[in-house]
Image (cartoon, rainbow, N blue to C red):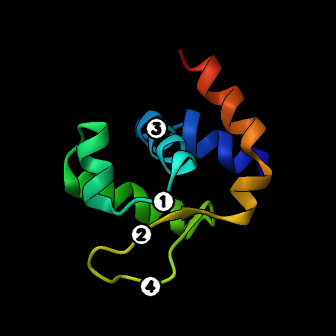
Amino acid sequence: MERLIWFLLAGTRGGPNRARILAALRDRPRNANQLAEALSLNYRTVLHHLKLLRQHGLITTPTEDAYGAAYFLSATMERNLGLLDRILREGR
């Protein structure tokens, strides 16, 4: 799991934005529009990153593909918050 998280957050061009999304979701659940506004990102870009994070089990939503669905950190990501913190620190 650690390698997957490192790859998704630090090993790809979109990794910094995915890390920012996870950090924002750590604070509180949000929908795609709220994330786009809070992070000053394009809405479709956020949707793309949310899809990847969900496919790899780092986030979850109780209502799949519903408009305005809130996203949460998955239990897997919750268990790896120390790794997220480390990646965010080293990425600065």
Query: Which residue is located at x 26 percent, y 79 percent?
Result: 67
Find numbered disc 3 in the image and state the secondary structure of the residue it sits on.
Answer: helix
- Residue type, numbered disc 3: Arg
Does dot 1 land on a helix, a strand or a loop?
A: loop
Q: CA distance from mark 2 to mark 3?
A: 16 Å
Numbered badge on residue 20: 3
Q: Amino acid at mark 1?
A: Pro
Query: What's the mark number on residue 70?
Result: 2
Above or below, 15 against 74 in this view is: above
Q: Earlier in the sequence, mark 3 or mark 1?
A: 3
Which residue type does callout 4 highlight?
Thr
**Residue holding disc 4:** 63
The first of marks 2 and 4 along the sequence is 4
For marks 4 and 3, give the CA distance.
Answer: 22 Å
Report if the CB atoms under discs 2 and 4 are less than 8 Å apart: yes
Q: Would you say 57 lies left or right of 40 here?
A: right
Query: Nearer the N terminus, badge 1 or badge 4?
Result: 1
Instruction: Give the residue at x 33% y 50%.
Output: 35
